[in-house]
Each structure stands twice: as structure tokens, then as C-alpha cells.
Image (cartoon, rainbow, N blue to C red):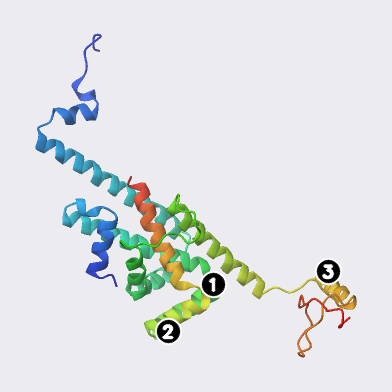
Amino acid sequence: MFREGETNNSEQEPLKIIQELPVDDREFHIELFKEEKVDVALEKQDAQLNFRERNCDKNTLSGLRKWLGVATVLGASLLAIGCNAEKSSSGFIDNEHQNVQQRLENQKKQIEHMKHMKNYKPGPEARQAAKEMQENQIIQPINDGTEQRPTGKVMNDSEL
Amino acid sequence: MITEEIKQNIIKELGLDEFPAEKAEEIMTKLEQNIERSLTLEVLDLLTVENQQEFMKIAETESDQEIKSFLESKIPNFDSLVKAVAESVVKEFKDLSK
């Protein structure tokens, strides 16, 4: 226990300890702090990736990674993020990291949507609606021998 | 394949040139690994199970160019995906190390 006004040396604020050090040692401590921040950042990234990797097939993961690791495509991409990194084309540059994440998400959604549309088969209601639209001459069916689908073409007065 | 020039550019971009060369190299290597791992996960996420199996067969027998062609056929804008992932990892690293 300490009386009022007394302090425990071991509990002094880190900044005060650094200030009391000789100049050379002080610089060493500041440099170490920067390195620690970088190490922590890498550890956090590592932990996040470990977590994601746990849910994947190990063989495919290592096969793909092995190839991607030697692929020149990665080198080209890293070159692009060097000193002359391009700004986001979206126009929102306040938070570049967020922009990149957003673009990545959009691209993933686009691919998912394409996969979904590739396997899309119209249900009975959609077929009925398409038939009604054709009957009402709102749209014109494709006449190429394949299954008839709405084209979205608007009929001219002369065609009606 | 990451050339020395590319590495130096990134080291400068991330302010790693303030560190001793050995430490900067160590950080760069780990960052490079994180980019590769993140890219692998994104690619895997976008491939169907059938495509993953097909990839494994191609990877065993075909050339790098054919593997790349396969991935490009299954993942539209593959190159831009790679670039986006690399940018994302580097920027995440920058934010985390502030």
C-alpha cells in the first residue's frame, strides 16, 4: 500500500518510463512499438484466415493455393497495388478498404446471380404470365425453333 | 512470382521502409502468404464442388496457362478478383497496423 502522493515505479505510465530513458533507448522503444503493431496486424489476419480455412476441403485448398502461389497473375496484381494504386472507380474514396470489400462483395453476388440464372427454369406462374403476355400481343415470341420465351420487345402500332 | 521491384514498391507503400531491411522482408513474406491464402479462399468460395474436383484433375496434368484458362472460364473477371483480393488484404493490413 502507498500513501497519498507516492507511486509504485512498476505501475508508472509507459510514456513516463520512456521519457526517463536515455535518448538511444527511447528510440529503441518507439521502434519496437511500431513493429509490435505490425506483428499484431499480421497475427489478426492470420487468425481470420485460419478460421476460414478450417471450413474448407484441405486437399483442394492446398492444390489451389500451390498453383496460385506460383501464378504470375498474383505478381501482376501486386504490381498494381504498389505506389501507383488505382483509386476506386465507384467514386467513393473516403474509405478505400471498405470500397474494395464492397466491390468484392458485389462481384461475388454477381457470380452467384449468374449461377442462379443459368439454372433458372420458369415456374408455372411465370409460364402462364408469359403466355398471357404473348396472347395479348404485348410481347413477341422468338421464332427460332427453341422454346418460346418473352423477349421484352415492344410491338409497334403497325405490327399489332 | 513477386519480383524484387514489386516488393520494394509495396514496402514503400506500406511504410515498411522505416523498418530494418530484415524485418521489412519478414513482414512482406507474411503479407504475401496472407494474400495467397485469402485469394485461395475467395476462389474456392466461387467454385462449385464439381468445379473444385475438375480443377484438381486439371492442376495435376495441365499447364499453368490451362489452369488459368479454366479458372477464368469459371470465374468471370478473374484478374480483377485477384487484384481486389490483393488490395483488400493490403488495405486491411494498413488499417490494422495503424
- Mark 2 vs mark 1, foreground winner is 2
Q: Closer to the camera: disc 1 or disc 3? A: 3
Q: Residues within 10 Å of mark 2 (few under 14, many from 20)?
A: few
What residue appears at the point 23 percent right and 11 percent down from the top-left corner? A5
Dot 3 and dot 2 within a common chain: no
Residue at the (87%, 82%) spot, across then down: A158
Q: Residue furthest front?
A: A158
Which residue is nearer to you in this view: A83 or B41?
A83
User: Can you say whether B75 is above or below A23 in the image?
Assistant: below
Q: Label 3 sits on what residue type? A: Glu
| Displayed quadrant of residue B57 | bottom left
Q: Residue furthest top?
A: A3
Q: Secondary structure at mark 2?
A: helix
Q: CA distance from mark 1 to mark 3?
A: 31 Å
A93 or B53, which is in the foreground?
A93
Q: Are marks 3 and 2 in contact (CB under 8 Å)?
A: no
Mark 3 highlights which residue? A125
Q: Amino acid at mark 1?
A: Val
Rendered view: B71 above or below B31: below
Residue identified by numbered label 2: B66
